[in-house]
Amino acid sequence: MTYDIRATRNFVAGNYLHKSHGYISPAGVFLHPEGQLKHPVSVTLKPYSKWPQLIATGLDSVAGQPQTFSALDYDFLYDSSMLMGKLEQLPSFEVRKIPHYVIPNPNPLRTVILKSWR
């Protein structure tokens, strides 16, 4: 199955693609098989070749598979936005020995994406 996604409206709840960055709101992009909402899922992203390969998301990285992320189920996937492109990365910090990385969204309407890796 193939389908097109419209990503032209720079709005807090929508998908947006610009020459400098892309924002994915998964609930408006990814379909799930009927009756399998609670199944594990993985997603591989392919950022525009002229962008740095940094992807900000709350999903876990899949070891050994670049730009591939996993979610416990589709509900978790749908709650985990994805931001990529020419992004600023602020200094990292630790809380209880867990590193946190802060990457502000270039769109001032959206909040900062905070990701910690364990």
Image (cartoon, rainbow, N blue to C red):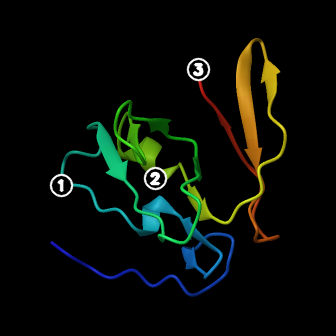
Q: Nearer the viewer, residue 110 or 69?
A: 69
Numbered disc 1: secondary structure: loop
**Amino acid residing under circle 2:** Tyr
**Amino acid residing under circle 1:** Glu
Point out the frontmost of discs 3 and 1: 3
Give the residue at the far front of this rendering.
50
Label 3 neighbour load within 10 Å: few <14, some 14-19, many 20+ = few
Q: Where is residue 70 drawn, in percent x and y?
A: 38, 39
Image height check: is 19 above or below 29? below
Q: Where is residue 90 drawn, in percent x and y?
A: 83, 46
Q: Nearer the viewer, residue 77 or 20?
A: 20
Image height check: is 96 above or below 18? above
Residue at label 3? Answer: 118
Numbered circle sitting on residue 78: 2
Q: Where is residue 18 drawn, in percent x and y?
A: 61, 81
Numbered circle sitting on residue 19: none
Point out the frontmost of discs 3 and 2: 3
Which mark is first along the chain, 2 or 3? 2
Which mark is first along the chain, 1 or 3? 1
Give the residue at the far top of this rendering.
96
Q: Where is residue 25 drawn, in percent x and y?
A: 52, 63
Q: Are marks 3 and 1 in contact (CB under 8 Å)?
A: no
Q: Are marks 1 and 2 in contact (CB under 8 Å)?
A: no
Numbered disc 3: secondary structure: loop
Numbered disc 2: secondary structure: helix
| Image quarter of residue 96 | top right
Q: Quadrant of the N terminus?
A: bottom left
Residue at label 1? Answer: 34
Left or right? Give the position of 31 relative to 72.
Answer: left
**Amino acid residing under circle 3:** Arg
